Image: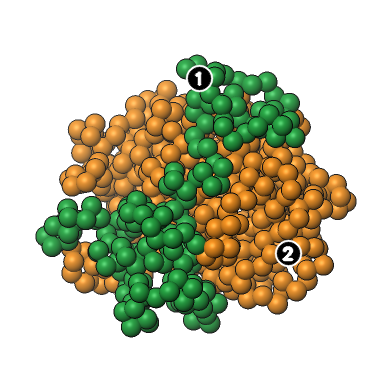
Chain colours: A green, B orange
Amino acid sequence: MPGPTKAIMALATGLSFLSTREAEVVKCAGEALLGVPRKELGDDFVAAFDRVAAGLEDFLRSDLHKLMLLLNVVTLGRFTRMEVSRRERLLTGWGHSRMPLLRTSFVTLRALCGWSWYSLRKSWPELEFPGETIGREHELPTLLFGKSPWTPPGSKPDARLPWLTPEEKIG
Amino acid sequence: MILTPGEITSTRWEVDICIIGSGAGGAIAAAKIASSGQRVLLLEEGSKVQQGDLNQDAARLVPLMYRRAGGLGTDDMSIRILQGKVLGGSCTINWMTCLRTPDMVLDEWGDRFGLEEYRPGEMTPHFEAVEQRLSVHTIPEENHNPQNRIILDGARELGVHAEASANNSVDCIGCGTCGLGCPYDAKQDMRLTYLADAQAHGTTILTGVRAERIHSLSPSQQRVEATILGEGNGAIERRLEVACTKVVVAASAIGTPLILQRSRLNGSRLLGKFLHLHPVTATIGVYDEILDPTYGIPQSTVCEHYSNLDGKGYGFWLEVPDIEPFLAGVNFPGLGRSRRDGMRNMRRMGMIITLVRDGADKRSNGEVRWRRGLNTQSGHLSISKVPSIRYRLSPTDKEHLQQGMEASIAFHFAAGAREVMTMHNQHQTLTSPGQIPPLRRLASGPNQLSMFSAHPTGTARMGKDRRLSVVDETMQMHHHPGIYVMDGSTLPTAPGVNPMITILATVSRALELGDLVS
């Protein structure tokens, strides 16, 4: 259970794990790691990160707080004010470092940011990923390979995957 | 009967057999023991899920169904471990591959561990029985998606053998979201097979209940302490106790040693050691044509041509998973804008994974145990015990991983890829097979090359000699009569194939040999 100060902060920000300062660090790290501008990442990216972190065991949450602190300490508190390219260089250096701790930090941060962004629907259009197949089963491209289309009860027969042109299906 | 935490009214249970864990081992044990007329109670820490819950929403389902919300890994996070924490265990979220344990592996168990009862001839009826129950079949030629054809096309070009794999599906439409549980109930997982059989024979399954400790009072008198986990924020946890004659621990090669160690049932110094992971790395080919790797039956083809590189059954094999955005997003190589641009090619990507049968050097690669760690419970710093998973590739296993990565790149180019990416932190994009040899110069130690695993096994291994193993051929603990381990932990070596069928068949055999099914 979070302490009273944490609980009040959580109510104010909607975040249950990250502090406001840490939320900004996460956004800046995500911008450098994923190549997606901070504005585009948005608050829902931070919320997704926060949800995963909040679900971790206590000792891992503690490690994540230390990781945020480390990012600020090594940049003398300037991490969120650095140019994106400098942040990218810093994190690349962590990934290539001889120090196992820095490599672990890099991999953890990249995995959490990658998950948080690409599990959000708004990241899917540029991947041309249309999302769930439920209700659109008969349009699955894989069914073209020798199998009769299968229409489950309740599906919408007129639904189309907009990104899949007939030529591509045949090809 | 399956109860969720809110439906559990009784906190004291008295049964014949208590089973901890509802994955492959726990499910088949429950079905067979219950069918012999004994009262069985099964405790599952994860949630009850049904077809209607499996709506393909990764953001909701991964935290719900994966251990540590999908973030389980070795202590240094150098190998991420994908493991189910849900009714039916990892079988609910796996990619359905059903391969028998190779004869060479079973013979190694006989030769090194005295397990004559598990020789290929003895195991055949058990493989046949579990395959029948799970509707296992070879995937027809016309059902391979374009991505899986990379394996077939590449193998043909390279002159090596690859073939259609087998899985446990019925009327699979290839939606590609096996990793989020099957929304069509096509996957014949434990919920639809052995757990259904267990329920039909009177087994009660309590979900959202975490086994904490086992008190072994005598060989025929056990007590299990458990916690009924709260549902939703602020829910109150409750204690639950089970009195029984015998306990079957089937909480996976990660969970089982942790429960037994916490219960001080660690008479064998080997408990928790000899962790095998089948470590995996991947290569991504980018093709001119659209492959749509998100869809289709995952791992419908397999190349086992390299599975016996040392003449002793150790090597690697190649498979092709489905690529979900969230899965690609976690492990995709590179950084910044180039990473984003790379991800935009998702529809033209094909991924090959290399799985290594680890343990070639015959020593313990890894260990699961409790270690002391810093906690911040309620905002106060404290030192307490935390679960620890440590693992290192041995030199031969590392060489096999490197060879597997190189082979998979060759497959991509042979199948027509225009470029291939590896999972090194030092991001590499290859445009021709001639660039494969220099890859060996890249740093590929822990967290320098992305690795993951979905096959932890071996932390309570089976054998005749109590100095070399934790459980005997009936899967009863050598040092603690009345306590059985029935899951992937008991496999004496890594099986060298996706382990679901191996776990089911070995537990089936152990039940035949032992006295649990009376």
At 31% from the left and 75% from the top, the residue drawn is A69
Q: Which of the two residues, B220 or B43, is positioned nearer the viewer here? A: B43
The residue positioned farthest toward the left in the image shown: A4
Q: Which of the two residues, B196 or B453, is positioned nearer the viewer here? A: B453
Q: Can residue B226 be seen in this view?
A: yes
Location of residue B93 in the rendering, given as x and y in whole percent from the top left corner: 50, 41
Location of residue B85 in the rendering, given as x and y in whole percent from the top left corner: 41, 46
**Disc 1 marks which amino acid?**
Lys
Q: In this view, does B52 lie above or below B437?
A: above
Q: Is residue B268 visible?
A: no
Contact between marks 1 and 2 (CB within 8 A): the answer is no
**Disc 2 marks which amino acid?**
Leu
Which disc is residue B333 wearing?
none
Location of residue B481 in the rendering, given as x and y in whole percent from the top left corner: 41, 51
At 51% from the left and 43% from the top, the residue drawn is A125
Q: In this view, does A169 lie above or below B354?
A: above
Question: Which residue matches tag 1?
Answer: A156
Question: Which residue matches tag 2?
Answer: B430
